[in-house]
Protein backbone atom coordinates (compact mmCIF):
# COMPACT_ATOMS: atom_id res chain seq x y z
CA UNK A 1 0.00 0.00 0.00
CA UNK A 2 1.39 3.21 -1.15
CA UNK A 3 0.17 6.62 0.07
CA UNK A 4 0.78 9.55 -2.18
CA UNK A 5 1.10 12.96 -0.55
CA UNK A 6 0.32 16.08 -2.54
CA UNK A 7 2.49 18.92 -1.32
CA UNK A 8 1.05 21.59 -3.62
CA UNK A 9 -0.13 24.43 -1.40
CA UNK A 10 -1.39 27.94 -2.12
CA UNK A 11 -3.73 29.50 -4.62
CA UNK A 12 -3.65 29.47 -8.35
CA UNK A 13 -3.42 32.70 -10.30
CA UNK A 14 -7.00 32.28 -11.51
CA UNK A 15 -8.31 31.95 -7.95
CA UNK A 16 -6.48 35.11 -6.87
CA UNK A 17 -7.81 37.09 -9.85
CA UNK A 18 -11.39 35.98 -9.12
CA UNK A 19 -11.14 37.01 -5.45
CA UNK A 20 -9.61 40.40 -6.31
CA UNK A 21 -12.35 41.02 -8.90
CA UNK A 22 -15.08 40.22 -6.34
CA UNK A 23 -13.52 42.55 -3.79
CA UNK A 24 -13.36 45.31 -6.42
CA UNK A 25 -17.03 44.87 -7.32
CA UNK A 26 -18.09 44.99 -3.67
CA UNK A 27 -15.94 48.07 -2.98
CA UNK A 28 -17.39 49.87 -6.01
CA UNK A 29 -20.94 49.12 -4.91
CA UNK A 30 -20.23 50.31 -1.37
CA UNK A 31 -18.68 53.56 -2.65
CA UNK A 32 -21.75 54.23 -4.78
CA UNK A 33 -24.09 53.91 -1.79
CA UNK A 34 -21.86 56.01 0.47
CA UNK A 35 -21.74 58.83 -2.09
CA UNK A 36 -25.48 58.61 -2.60
CA UNK A 37 -26.44 58.81 1.08
CA UNK A 38 -23.66 61.04 2.45
CA UNK A 39 -25.54 64.32 1.70
CA UNK A 40 -28.56 62.97 3.63
CA UNK A 41 -26.41 62.13 6.66
CA UNK A 42 -24.65 65.50 6.53
CA UNK A 43 -28.01 67.31 6.45
CA UNK A 44 -29.20 65.37 9.51
CA UNK A 45 -25.95 66.13 11.33
CA UNK A 46 -26.07 69.86 10.52
CA UNK A 47 -29.72 70.08 11.58
CA UNK A 48 -29.10 68.29 14.88
CA UNK A 49 -26.09 70.49 15.61
CA UNK A 50 -28.04 73.68 14.91
CA UNK A 51 -30.90 72.55 17.15
CA UNK A 52 -28.35 71.67 19.82
CA UNK A 53 -26.76 75.14 19.57
CA UNK A 54 -30.18 76.78 20.01
CA UNK A 55 -30.99 74.55 22.98
CA UNK A 56 -27.60 75.29 24.53
CA UNK A 57 -28.21 79.04 24.18
CA UNK A 58 -31.58 78.65 25.89
CA UNK A 59 -30.06 76.61 28.70
CA UNK A 60 -27.21 79.08 29.21
CA UNK A 61 -29.63 82.03 29.33
CA UNK A 62 -31.52 80.39 32.18
CA UNK A 63 -28.37 79.19 33.95
CA UNK A 64 -26.56 82.53 33.76
CA UNK A 65 -29.72 84.62 34.17
CA UNK A 66 -28.53 86.67 31.22
CA UNK A 67 -29.80 86.76 27.61
CA UNK A 68 -28.10 84.43 25.15
CA UNK A 69 -28.33 85.03 21.41
CA UNK A 70 -27.85 82.98 18.26
CA UNK A 71 -26.92 85.25 15.38
CA UNK A 72 -26.82 84.06 11.76
CA UNK A 73 -24.27 85.21 9.16
CA UNK A 74 -22.32 86.94 11.91
CA UNK A 75 -18.58 87.67 12.20
CA UNK A 76 -17.68 85.36 9.31
CA UNK A 77 -19.65 82.41 10.68
CA UNK A 78 -22.92 80.97 9.42
CA UNK A 79 -24.19 81.07 12.99
CA UNK A 80 -22.74 82.17 16.29
CA UNK A 81 -24.13 81.78 19.82
CA UNK A 82 -23.06 84.00 22.68
CA UNK A 83 -23.99 85.40 26.09
CA UNK A 84 -25.13 88.94 25.32
CA UNK A 85 -23.90 90.89 28.34
CA UNK A 86 -24.86 94.33 26.98
CA UNK A 87 -28.16 93.05 25.51
CA UNK A 88 -27.73 94.61 22.06
CA UNK A 89 -28.10 91.27 20.17
CA UNK A 90 -24.71 91.79 18.50
CA UNK A 91 -21.50 89.94 19.31
CA UNK A 92 -19.00 92.46 20.60
CA UNK A 93 -16.45 93.05 23.34
CA UNK A 94 -17.58 91.72 26.68
CA UNK A 95 -19.81 89.01 25.23
CA UNK A 96 -18.96 85.37 25.87
CA UNK A 97 -18.91 83.16 22.77
CA UNK A 98 -20.56 79.76 23.21
CA UNK A 99 -20.43 78.29 19.71
CA UNK A 100 -19.41 79.35 16.19
CA UNK A 101 -20.24 77.22 13.15
CA UNK A 102 -19.50 77.25 9.43
CA UNK A 103 -21.86 75.21 7.27
CA UNK A 104 -18.88 74.47 5.02
CA UNK A 105 -17.87 71.97 7.72
CA UNK A 106 -20.94 69.96 6.73
CA UNK A 107 -20.26 69.06 3.12
CA UNK A 108 -23.30 69.26 0.84
CA UNK A 109 -25.35 71.51 3.22
CA UNK A 110 -26.39 75.17 2.85
CA UNK A 111 -29.25 77.38 3.92
CA UNK A 112 -32.40 76.38 2.05
CA UNK A 113 -34.92 78.41 0.05
CA UNK A 114 -37.01 79.25 3.14
CA UNK A 115 -33.89 80.83 4.64
CA UNK A 116 -33.87 82.23 8.15
CA UNK A 117 -37.10 83.84 9.36
CA UNK A 118 -35.85 85.42 12.60
CA UNK A 119 -35.94 89.22 12.93
CA UNK A 120 -32.73 91.10 12.11
CA UNK A 121 -30.67 92.83 14.78
CA UNK A 122 -29.18 96.34 14.40
CA UNK A 123 -26.42 94.97 12.15
CA UNK A 124 -28.93 93.35 9.77
CA UNK A 125 -28.22 89.80 10.95
CA UNK A 126 -31.12 87.44 11.70
CA UNK A 127 -31.03 86.67 15.42
CA UNK A 128 -32.97 84.89 18.10
CA UNK A 129 -32.36 85.35 21.79
CA UNK A 130 -33.42 83.58 24.94
CA UNK A 131 -34.17 85.37 28.20
CA UNK A 132 -33.54 84.20 31.76
CA UNK A 133 -36.82 82.22 31.70
CA UNK A 134 -35.89 80.38 28.48
CA UNK A 135 -38.39 82.22 26.28
CA UNK A 136 -37.33 83.18 22.77
CA UNK A 137 -37.14 86.93 22.29
CA UNK A 138 -36.11 89.55 19.75
CA UNK A 139 -33.84 92.51 20.50
CA UNK A 140 -36.78 94.48 21.94
CA UNK A 141 -37.64 91.66 24.35
CA UNK A 142 -40.83 90.64 22.52
CA UNK A 143 -41.69 86.95 22.11
CA UNK A 144 -40.55 85.65 18.75
CA UNK A 145 -40.71 82.50 16.70
CA UNK A 146 -39.00 81.49 13.50
CA UNK A 147 -37.17 78.82 11.61
CA UNK A 148 -33.93 78.03 9.85
CA UNK A 149 -34.13 76.00 6.65
CA UNK A 150 -31.19 73.77 5.72
CA UNK A 151 -30.91 71.99 2.38
CA UNK A 152 -28.46 69.48 0.93
CA UNK A 153 -27.21 69.22 -2.65
CA UNK A 154 -29.88 66.63 -3.47
CA UNK A 155 -32.70 69.08 -2.67
CA UNK A 156 -33.71 67.51 0.66
CA UNK A 157 -34.39 70.06 3.37
CA UNK A 158 -35.06 70.13 7.09
CA UNK A 159 -36.04 73.00 9.33
CA UNK A 160 -35.12 73.90 12.88
CA UNK A 161 -38.08 75.69 14.45
CA UNK A 162 -38.15 77.84 17.59
CA UNK A 163 -41.52 78.79 19.10
CA UNK A 164 -42.25 81.74 21.45
CA UNK A 165 -41.97 79.45 24.49
CA UNK A 166 -38.34 78.82 23.48
CA UNK A 167 -38.87 75.21 22.48
CA UNK A 168 -36.63 73.99 19.68
CA UNK A 169 -37.68 71.19 17.33
CA UNK A 170 -36.65 69.70 14.01
CA UNK A 171 -39.15 69.14 11.21
Image (spheres, grey):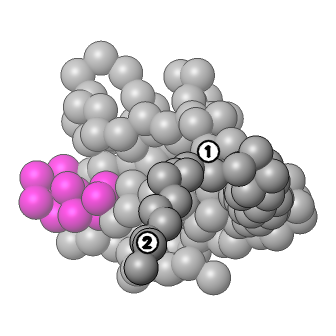
Q: Which mark is residue 106?
A: 1
Going from the N terminus, do you reach mark 2 or mark 1 first? Answer: 2
Tell me the quarter of the image containing the N terminus: bottom left
Magenta residue span:
56-66
Q: Is residue 29 visible?
A: yes
**To which quarter of the image does residue 168 belong?**
bottom left
Residue 145 in picture, x, y percent from top left = 56, 73
Residue 167 in picture, x, y percent from top left = 40, 80
Residue 89 in picture, x, y percent from top left = 43, 40
Q: Residue at x 63, y 52 (%)?
A: 11
- Label 2: which secondary element: loop
Q: Which mark is residue 56?
A: none
Q: Is residue 159 left or right of residue 142?
A: right
Residue 22 in picture, x, y percent from top left = 77, 61
Q: CA distance from mark 2 to mark 1?
A: 67 Å
Q: Is residue 82 left or right of residue 161?
A: left
**Which residue occupies the foreground of this view, 167 or 23?**
23
Magenta-span inclusion, residue 59: yes
Tell me the quarter of the image containing the C terminus: bottom right
Q: Residue at x 43, y 72 (%)?
A: 3
Amino acid sequence: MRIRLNNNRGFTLVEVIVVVALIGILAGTAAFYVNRYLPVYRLREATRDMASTLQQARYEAVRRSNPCVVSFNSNGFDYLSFVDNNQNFQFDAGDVQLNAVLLANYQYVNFGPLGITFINNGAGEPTVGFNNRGLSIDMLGAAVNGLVDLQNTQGHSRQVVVNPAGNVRIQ
